């Protein structure tokens, strides 16, 4: 390697390492930090963020990127690293430091206001905060300077994706989901969730979660499982920590939560060891990340073959509690479809409708077509149109998610994209592993993990997500695979 | 405040915040980091250390210090902040970055080699490592450029203290301790530790430790108690975490370990809220820090009045195990004096002899009078001279401590200084709180904590440790208070 390239990579690795620290500080805060450490943690994060920003925007780093760019032809990986380094550097340089700081502060205040407003069901007190955050976020988008403001935001989470593409993709998806939902609601069979609401002691839930995570290939020597109010995955490669939460009266919370986070964690643990600190060695996008969690949570974790093996294991963790339940009944229970108010509790059919609703609203907010004062009415109107129900309060409506208070406009779509990627990947996996269901029935999860590692994890972000999708599945992302999967599955569960 | 002063303090706070992060990364590594995260953690620490070093040595920071220094007259606190900022900046500037990096790497390797050498009782394999670390440490001392090399090292841990002063102080202390030890060993009464070696389940030990820490005033909302192989205290002010370890067959380990760390923690939690991020708002020195831990562990925690209240509490945590034990018998057991090989297990009388031995050896190593190859022989010779015993192996001799492999030459003396400060502070506390023993007998620990907070904690490092000692006790540090305390106490325990 030339000296210039070495310097370029050393800089990239330093920036990466600082980001790892930022994540660790966040994990610590969510999971174990004592209450009175909050102010110091904010100071630490601010100091570190400023330093990391300075390193990323350092003109000397820009020079290095430029120097390496000359004569890169033929080296796909280096080209990808340069592309990602340039993306990050150019974007950071364009956004004035003062705007970054002002927005960070506004978001911090808005999150506190949101928590309070949600608890009190008081949208009016939150509205000025979200208006301010929206305004500053629009100014960030303008500074980035793409033709379309929303694209500038989206690009941070799903590189290469555009608002125009999402509109086409999601309007198709929305109509098909609503039709499927109507079919389900009109079906004669009405499976019940009752079996999931018996008494399941925490210790058994935790032991089962650890067992499945281990079977999936999650490496506990390179991670840990803790508890937190909002489950999440943190870290990369050799230190990838997951959290979950337990509800002794509702099995789904920890069960599918742990599968979900372990899916995210496998992605991070599966990155290329030689490249995980390089710009294109990281995860491809948030959408692809979400595909990995949903893959395990839903496509495998809510399937019959999976439970043919794991229901007896689960029964063993709760002696006497589940003995009367058949695999079919259990599978039906974890696949009940029902319009509901809360996104994070939604089933596979209605979940994406919650996302599309948010996308349409935030798209209108960013373009200026919708004002923040009109958000609750617009929210409820769309809930009625998509799901046929009207939230009884803003608490279970427009105030339910933290994202907008945190400035995360353009983030929601990646959840839906994750579901679509997952289904499209699954079709290829079934082709490559024709005896998949048989293996799942025997509790063999590692072949799936190996397939994902080879096709997704180790690719990192060498390719833009849409290109990665084409390379893996042979076609661009669409709603077809997801709709085919959902149609077949729910026809079986609901008997239509 | 003028704009220049504001800028000066903002810079100081940033440097402080980065140091807090470094400590948290270390805590996480010792307490909960998954095994495979080690390499990434090393990268994170290296990246952060380099950035922090660059901020501290930044010529612009030096300029700021100089600018504020003009016209500081009359402001004692500002003057102290400037003194400490200048000390840290000047020292960092003098040591070449390449030497810092080379030494950090040599220490990392030496620590691994030390662990292995200790396990295998193989000093020869460790010797080249400690020789290398010593060489690099001497070069650091030379770069700092004080007249005496050892003083340059000592100054980092105990500002203002010199090797010459230590030699006088310690040779007096050594002779008096040896005389006291001989008296004890010749005494007719031979108290036994047997009662401490019954079966004490971990849960009871932990509950008792938490109870006492709480009574001391340790704020669990600004800290946590965890387990680690080597107990330590980490963090400051609103986030001060302590660790301990449990031995179900030896009560002392966790009991006095927790008191010790909680004593350190009270110091950090008790710093001035307005100043803990400023250069002179931090702890005064490692010696003063150690005085706080030893104060609680020994001067209170190994006293009769303390156990008059806490023995019944302890008995309650281990039903049936301790019922036959009187306060006098228990006190005698926790005060058994016996020459032994391991520093961290030594009693109050022999402990400082272990320290003085190390001081004399490292002083000779740094001056060049002793070579690393001759260390084991020199160690064993001094053990024989001070304590009358010869280690059967280097494992329980020269290889027992991690310090030298970590480059911590000049650090050991602070442990002995802590014991001396503590005893000297105690004399004043007894004058200020004449009914101290009565209060302790009733389990009232908070008056002690308040006294320490006012006289020690909130002072931070406004004064150099020797000046702080004079302000609190009216005289310079000496061995007198400690020897008087030990003489009285052990005469009682051993009946001479």
Image (tube, coloured by chain):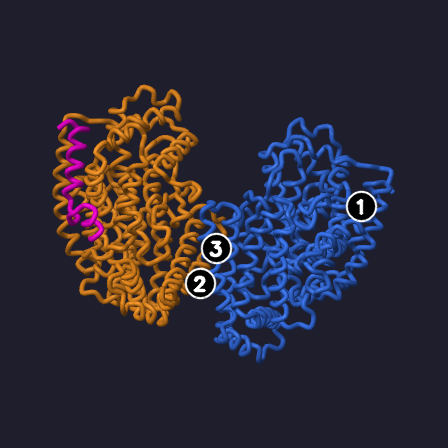
Chain colours: A orange, B blue
Q: Quadrant of residue A443?
A: top left
Mark 1 vs 3, N-terminal side:
3
CA gap between label 3 and label 2 equals: 20 Å
| Magenta portion: prevailing SS class | helix
Q: Which residue has dot 2 on it? A: A47
Residue located 72% across and 39% down the image: B307
Badge 2 element: helix
Is residue B187 or residue B98 the one in the foreground? B98
Q: Are marks 1 and 2 on the same chain?
A: no
Label 1 resides on the chain identified as: B
Secondary structure of the residue carrying numbered label 1 = helix
Foreground: disc 3 or disc 2: 3
Read off the chain for label 3: B
The residue to which callout 3 is attached is B42
Marks 3 and 2 on same chain? no
Residue B98, above or below A366: below
Q: Is residue B479 visible?
A: yes
Q: Is residue A487 magenta?
A: yes
**Residue B21 relative to residue A341: left or right:** right
The answer to whether the residue labelled 1 contacts the one labelled 2, judged by CB atoms less than 8 Å apart, is no
The CA distance from mark 1 to mark 3 is 47 Å
- Magenta residues span A467-496
Provide the residue designation for mark 1: B489
Residue B78, visible in the rendered structure: no
Residue visible at 45% across and 57% down in the picture: B44
């Amino acid at each position: 390697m030339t000296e210039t390239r070495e310097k370029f990579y050393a800089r990239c690795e330093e920036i990466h390492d600082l980001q790892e620290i930022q994540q660790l500080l966040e994990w610590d805060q969510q999971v174990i930090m004592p209450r009175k450490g909050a102010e110091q943690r904010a100071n630490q994060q601010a100091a570190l963020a400023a330093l990391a920003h300075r390193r990323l925007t350092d003109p000397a780093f820009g020079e290095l990127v430029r120097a390496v760019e000359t004569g890169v032809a033929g080296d796909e990986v280096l080209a990808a690293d340069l592309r990602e380094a340039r993306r990050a550097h150019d974007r950071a340089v364009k956004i004035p430091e003062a705007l970054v700081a002002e927005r960070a502060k506004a978001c911090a205040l808005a999150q506190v206001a949101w928590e309070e407003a949600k608890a009190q069901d008081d949208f009016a007190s939150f509205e000025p905060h979200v208006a301010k955050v929206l305004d500053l976020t629009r100014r960030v988008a303008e500074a980035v300077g793409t033709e379309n403001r929303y694209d500038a935001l989206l690009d941070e989470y799903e590189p290469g994706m555009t608002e125009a593409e999402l509109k086409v993709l999601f309007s198709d998806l929305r109509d098909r989901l609503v039709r499927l939902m109507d079919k389900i609601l009109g079906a004669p069979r009405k499976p019940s969730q009752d079996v999931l609401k018996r008494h399941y002691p925490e210790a058994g839930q935790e032991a089962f979660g650890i067992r499945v995570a281990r079977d999936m290939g999650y490496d506990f020597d390179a991670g840990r499982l803790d508890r937190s109010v909002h489950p999440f995955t943190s870290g990369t490669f050799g230190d990838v920590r997951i959290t979950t939460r337990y509800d002794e009266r509702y099995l789904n919370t920890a069960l599918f939560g742990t599968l979900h986070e372990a899916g995210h964690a496998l992605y991070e643990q599966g990155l290329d060891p030689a490249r995980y600190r390089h710009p294109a060695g990281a995860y491809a996008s948030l959408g692809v990340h979400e595909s990995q969690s949903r893959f395990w949570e839903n496509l495998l974790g809510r399937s019959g073959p999976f439970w043919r093996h794991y229901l007896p294991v689960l029964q063993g963790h709760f002696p006497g509690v589940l003995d009367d339940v058949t695999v079919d009944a259990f599978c039906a229970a974890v696949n009940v479809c029902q319009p509901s108010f809360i996104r994070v509790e939604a089933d596979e059919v209605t979940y994406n409708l919650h996302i599309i609703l948010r996308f349409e609203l935030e798209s209108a907010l960013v373009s200026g077509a919708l004002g923040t004062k009109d958000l609750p009415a617009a929210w409820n109107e769309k809930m009625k149109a998509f799901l046929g129900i009207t939230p009884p309060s803003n608490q279970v409506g427009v105030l339910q998610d933290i994202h907008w208070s945190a400035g995360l406009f353009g983030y929601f779509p990646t959840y839906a994209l994750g579901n679509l990627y997952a289904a499209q990947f699954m079709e290829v996996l079934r082709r490559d592993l024709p005896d998949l269901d048989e293996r799942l029935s025997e509790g063999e999860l590692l072949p799936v993990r190996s397939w994902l590692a080879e096709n997704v994890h180790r690719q990192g972000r060498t390719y833009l997500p849409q290109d990665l999708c084409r390379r893996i599945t042979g076609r661009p992302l669409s709603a077809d695979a997801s709709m085919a999967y959902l149609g077949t599955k729910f026809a079986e569960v609901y008997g239509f």
